[in-house]
Image (cartoon, grey):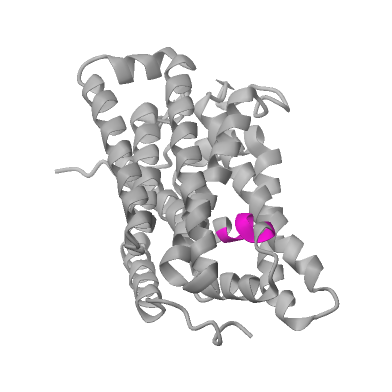
Amino acid sequence: MELDLPFIWAAIIAFAVLAYVVLDGFDLGIGILFPFFRQKHDRDVMMNSVAPVWDGNETWLVLGGGGLLAVFPLAYATILPALYAPLIAMLLGLIFRGVAFEYRWRTKRAEWLWDWAFAGGSIVAAFAQGIALGALVQGIPVANRAYAGGWWDWLTPFSILTGIALVIGYALLGATWLVMRTEGELAERARNFAFFTVFGTVAAMGIVSVWTPFLKPQYLDRWFAFPGALLTVTVPLLVFACLYGVLTGLRDNKDKRPFLCSLGLFVLAYAGIGISFYPYIVPTSLTIWDAAGPDESLGFLLVGAAVLVPAILIYTSYAYWVFRGKMNPDEGYH
């Protein structure tokens, strides 16, 4: 049986992007919450809680972007010109955040500067990712195998909404991460933020979900025609189940449950986007088969991915296992 290499690679890249969102989302969320925690001790603990894993989390972003270039070059050449501004803003935000991790511990006089670099970089990166997502969902015009839109097509009310929604969602992941990993007053304050942000996240998901089917006729057909209509009923029920899990976990001091259920919200949102997109990689202009490179190239790259992806998964799992449990506030990244 002949392998459908474009479909396999689309699944690998989709998995890499999802892994990046759920893993890097909570440490971006730590940065988003940073301005609300004024005590130096709290900020030290917050940064230390993600210091062992934050750079490894971004490996998935490299895999997703690099895989798109290598496997779906036409999609890469179409998406980048459409999203240059938000993607450059995202990369600059990630750079400032990464530099802040190193420099904040090396200075006292300019510590406030790197605190703001960490917070600002996290907020800008999260908002830019949401903007890029919204612009992709609303569609990218393609003519003669090239981007056919304007400089500012990415900036719309819908993309601004998705940008705000992702900032709120990442803040939820950051808050529930702190609940799971810290103790005392810091954990209690994070618990309060988790209560507010989970309602904000679910509300934003609801607004985006209602708006999305009316952006493209294909989305409307996918969600309200059989069998897609079954998912239209099922997904909201699962969202409310995750919401219940977050709230009861916060109430009953089941510290792992809110974080895991918050991740569930992101997985459900991502699945909804995937259902809307398929089989397009550039909605609604290019399918995964239109944009794919030659099968020979895809097969060669798949051999490397068969080694690389399990290796990253093993490393990531091991890192989280080693640094599991509640933090000791006296140990960290110093």
Q: Is residue 298 magenta?
A: no
Q: Residue at x 67, y 24 (%)?
A: 153
- Give left or right: position of 33 versus 109: left
> In the picture shown, does residue 119 fall above or below 8?
below
Residue stretch in magenta: 30-35
> Closer to the camera, 148 or 47?
47
On the rendered image, what quadrant is the N terminus found in? top left
Q: Is residue 226 left or right of residue 329?
A: left
Which residue is found at the position 55% from the left and 44% from the top?
168
From this view, report whether residue 86 is shown above or below residue 323. above
Q: Is residue 48 left or right of residue 110?
A: left
* Residue 188 appears in the rendering: yes
Q: Quadrant of the C terminus?
A: bottom right
Residue 308 at x, y = what percent? 38, 66
Residue at image location 55% in from the left, 56% down from the top: 29
Residue 78 image position (x, y, % from top left): 58, 33
Task: Please give left or right for residue 330 compared with residue 35 in the image.
Answer: left
Q: Main secondary structure of the magenta part?
A: helix
Residue 243 lies, in percent from the top left, at: 35, 43
**In front: 269, or 193?**
193
Query: Which residue of the protein is positioned furthest toward the right in this rendering?
Result: 109
Residue 110 location in percent, x, y?
84, 73
